[in-house]
Amino acid sequence: DQQVKQNSPSLSVQEGRISILNCDYTNSMFDYFLWYKKYPAEGPTFLISISSIKDKNEDGRFTVFLNKSAKHLSLHIVPSQPGDSAVYFCAADEGGKLIFGQGTELSVKP
Amino acid sequence: AAGVIQSPRHLIKEKRETATLKCYPIPRHDTVYWYQQGPGQDPQFLISFYEKMQSDKGSIPDRFSAQQFSDYHSELNMSSLELGDSALYFCASSLKGQGFYNEQFFGPGTRLTVL
């Protein structure tokens, strides 16, 4: 049973435009969420996180939005750059261990 | 800045052999986590250690064991290897004592291939 879901396996965006990656979760007890970026043959790299006491967290070009009532979060990348092309994983913290979504492969085209 | 180090980066074993994967956390981090990522799958939590004590256990087979040593490095021991154990194994570390929420920082992974 997938508790964290990323329903879009891939996303293609033009350079300079906004990339929006979505993530849904089923467990209302989750209260801390993280986004990781992963290149092939490398480990996941931490991008940004948000706790359930907030509905938005911003760090440079990256903003994460959390809608607790809908059990949905999204990662916005503005403006998108070709170097952002990677697989993005959404994860929920369950008492210290991370529950990952399936990942979304973002391709930013010049 | 120092990152999480994993060794070896690649490992090829035969069925029924044993394997040992090593992880060196970021200096001063007190918690180590192990994850397994099968082909085309998301990383799955295996086990974690806080201050050298096992703190949580996920879907780790009984054939696997792990420990964290006094210098905080951790080893994942895998015995009676099966073809299905072929995967990327990631180690992550965090500084749990810093606060309730802590980002986990991942190593580059060990790619295990069982033939």
Image (cartoon, coloured by chain):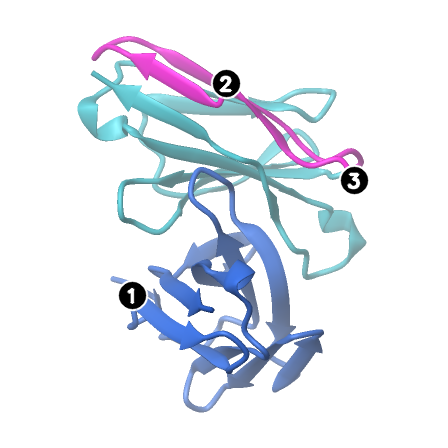
Residue B108 visible: yes
Residue B26 among those drawn in magenta: yes
Q: Chain of mark 3?
A: B
The answer to whether residue A46 is above or below residue B62 is: below
Residue A23 visible: no
Query: Residue B105, labelled with which disc?
Result: none
| Residue identified by numbered label 1 | A9
The answer to whether residue A60 is above or below residue A67 is: above
Residue A105 in percent (x, y) is at 37, 61
**What residue sits 54% from the left and 59% below the top?**
A83
Q: Quadrant of residue A55?
A: bottom right
The answer to whether residue A20 is above or below residue A34 is: below
| Residue identified by numbered label 2 | B8
Q: Secondary structure at mark 1?
A: loop
Which chain is blue in the rendering?
A
Which chain is cyan in the rendering?
B
Query: Residue B1, labelled with which disc?
Result: 3
Q: Which residues are magenta?
A: B1-28
Q: Secondary structure at mark 3?
A: loop
Same-subunit check for callouts 3 and 2: yes
Residue A81 in percent (x, y) is at 55, 68
Count residues near mark 3 (Cα–Cα under 10 Å), then give few for <14, some for 14-19, many for 20+.
Answer: few
Q: Chain of mark 1?
A: A
Q: Secondary structure at mark 2?
A: loop
The answer to whether residue B14 is above or below residue A82 is: above
Q: Amino acid at mark 2?
A: Pro
Count residues near mark 2 (Cα–Cα under 10 Å), then give few for <14, some for 14-19, many for 20+.
Answer: some
Of the 4 image quadrants, the one containing the N terminus of chain B is: top right
Going from N to C along the chain, the mark reached first, 3 or 2, is 3
Give yes or no for contact between labels 1 and 3 (Cβ–Cβ under 8 Å): no
Q: Amino acid at mark 3?
A: Ala
